[in-house]
Structure formats: C-alpha cells, structure tokens
Image (spheres, helix red, strand yellow):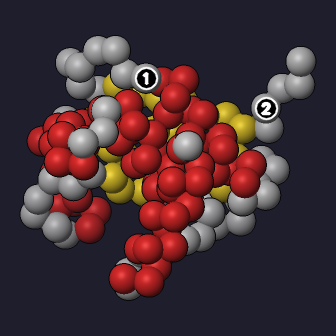
Amino acid sequence: MDETPYTITVLNRTDHSPIPRSHIIGSVERVLQGEGISDATVSVAILTDEEIHQVNKEFLEHDYPTDVITFSLEEDCIDGEICIGLETAQRQAQEYGVSLRNELMRLAAHGTLHLVGYDDATDEERRAMSVLEDKYIS
C-alpha cells in the first residue's frame, strides 16, 4: 500500500463526539490530489464557537464566531491550519439541510482550497469555490 504524501491531522477541541475524522481527512486529501499538490501538511482544528470567535478577533480583527478560518504557515509549500467552528457548522448544516458530517467535510474542503490559493472575496470567486467544494466532497 502506498503511503500518502500528506500529513493531515484533526484535533477536536470540543465536547462533541464523535467527529468524523476520516471524512474530514478524505476531503482535505481529495482537494490536494485534485489540485495537483504533491506534498502537504494540514492540521484541522474543530473549535467551539467561543474559541473560533477569539481566533477571529485576535488574528482577523472580526468580533464574531465564524465557520472556518485558514492559516497558511509556509509560503513555499502547503503547510497550514484550518480552524472550524463546530456550533456554527451545526447551525449551517441544519440551515442547508445536510448532515453535520457533510458540513464539516465542506468546510475542510473550503479551508484547503484557500491553502492551495483560491479566494472567495467576490461573488464569482465564492461560486467557483462552491463548485469545487461540491466536486471534492461528493
């Protein structure tokens, strides 16, 4: 069996259990493979809304919780951290009529797309990322 060229970890900092780690890892891997990335290290942290609110405030100066924040840790390779707000993901899953697993997979894919260079600052960019998210989580 071939070893993956990726190091992907999922850390659950919430009381929610179980977190679908293998599905989250699979989403990250599919994006990396699909985007032609040959080597990457990605950490996915599942945080409470209180924790992601603090991260959002400290690093982005936004005073609210959010669903996903991505940090690129290296400029010349794919090495980054994706933070996902669990309670926000739960609310969004309910709003979109999908499972929490599906929403966590989508947010992991979204964060990974940011790591590989995609942006969602405009409506057009958001639509393009949404299409890619669908592709990589289906």
Left or right: 3, with 70 as reference point: right
Residue 1 versus residue 6 in the image, above or below: above
At a point 37% along the width and 22% down the height, the residue shown is 19
The answer for how far apart the CA atoms under marks 2 and 1 are is 19 Å
Outermost front residue: 97
Q: Is residue 56 visible?
A: yes
Left or right: 91, with 1 as reference point: left
Residue corresponding to mark 2? 4
Quadrant containing the C terminus in the rendered view: top right
Three-letter amino acid code at the position of disc 2: Thr
Three-letter amino acid code at the position of disc 1: Pro
Which label lies toward us, 2 or 1?
1
Between residues 42 and 106, which one lies in front from this camera angle? 106
Quadrant containing the N terminus in the rendered view: top right
Residue 32 versus residue 116 in the image, above or below: above
Position of residue 22 measured from the top left corner of the image (x, y, whole percent): 54, 23
Between residues 101 and 5, which one lies in front from this camera angle? 101
Q: Name the disc covering residue 20, or none.
A: 1
Query: Which element is circle 1 on?
Result: loop
Residue 18 versus residue 40 in the image, above or below: above
At a point 72% along the width and 38% down the height, the residue shown is 6
